[in-house]
Amino acid sequence: MTASRAAAVCLAAVVLTACSPDAPKGVDKDTLDAAISQAIGDPASCLLIAEQASGKLVYRYNTHSACARALPACDGTNNDTQTIDQLLKATEKDGQTHMLSCSSTNDASRGVGWASGPIPGKGLVYAAMMEGDRAFPGRMMADRLANAFKAAGL
């Protein structure tokens, strides 16, 4: 590998790392990653944590592309979809817990679960999504995540 190519690879790694949020203040990212992985870990799951007042993203579990998918909103509307960013923004505004789930395919072979809400006493809100043939329902995700947050010191 040439020196210029190696420098370009290093620069790309630094840029990608800089764009990814680390973890909420006072929380070890590796501990939080492990707790979230234990609770809802899957290549098709995503979790975002933001400051409720400012909307600043402070943590993301999984890649941006895994988190960017529009999936059925499961809110009873006609085939409306949502992204996890939309759910996070709605939760920032209303401060309420949301727990939804439904089929994500016409043949019901796959499902999607959504969970979001405030993280008590921290000024933070979260939004989580799982999609696949073994996705947890939203209520189960919320329960598992509450335990994961406590285990990680949130």
Image (cartoon, rainbow, N blue to C red):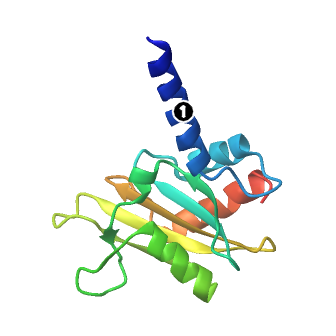
Q: In the rendered view of the protein, which quadrant contains the C terminus?
A: bottom right
- Check disc 1 and give the amino acid type: Leu
Percent x, y of residue 33: 63, 45
Kind of element beneath mark 1: helix
The percent coordinates of residue 94 (x first, y second) are 60, 88
The residue to which callout 1 is attached is: 11
Indicate left or right for 88 with 133 as reference: right
Q: Residue furthest top?
A: 1
Camera-nearest residue between 81 and 36: 81
Q: Could one spot residue 65 in this view of the protein?
A: yes
Is 146 above or below relative to 65?
Answer: below
Q: Is residue 75 left or right of residue 154?
A: left
Give the image quarter of residue 11. Answer: top right
Q: Is residue 20 left or right of residue 1?
A: right
Do we see residue 97 in this rendering? Answer: no
On the rendered image, what quadrant is the N terminus found in?
Answer: top left
26 or 107, nearer to the observer: 26
Q: Which image quarter: residue 48?
A: bottom right
Q: For this rendering, which residue is in front, 95 or 110?
A: 95
In the displayed structure, 43 sits above or below 149; it is above
Q: Residue shown at 32%/86% (left/top)?
A: 76
User: Which residue is located at x 43 percent, y 57 percent?
Assistant: 67
Total label count? 1
> Eyeballing the image, is 109 above or below 119?
above
Which residue appears at 50% of the width and 35% of the height? 12
Q: Position of residue 130 (x, y in %)?
A: 43, 58
Residue 72 is situated, as x and y percent measured from the top left of the image, at: 31, 72
Q: Residue at x 76, y 74 (%)?
A: 123
Q: Residue furthest front?
A: 4
Mark 1, other Cα within 10 Å: few <14 / some 14–19 / many ≥20? few
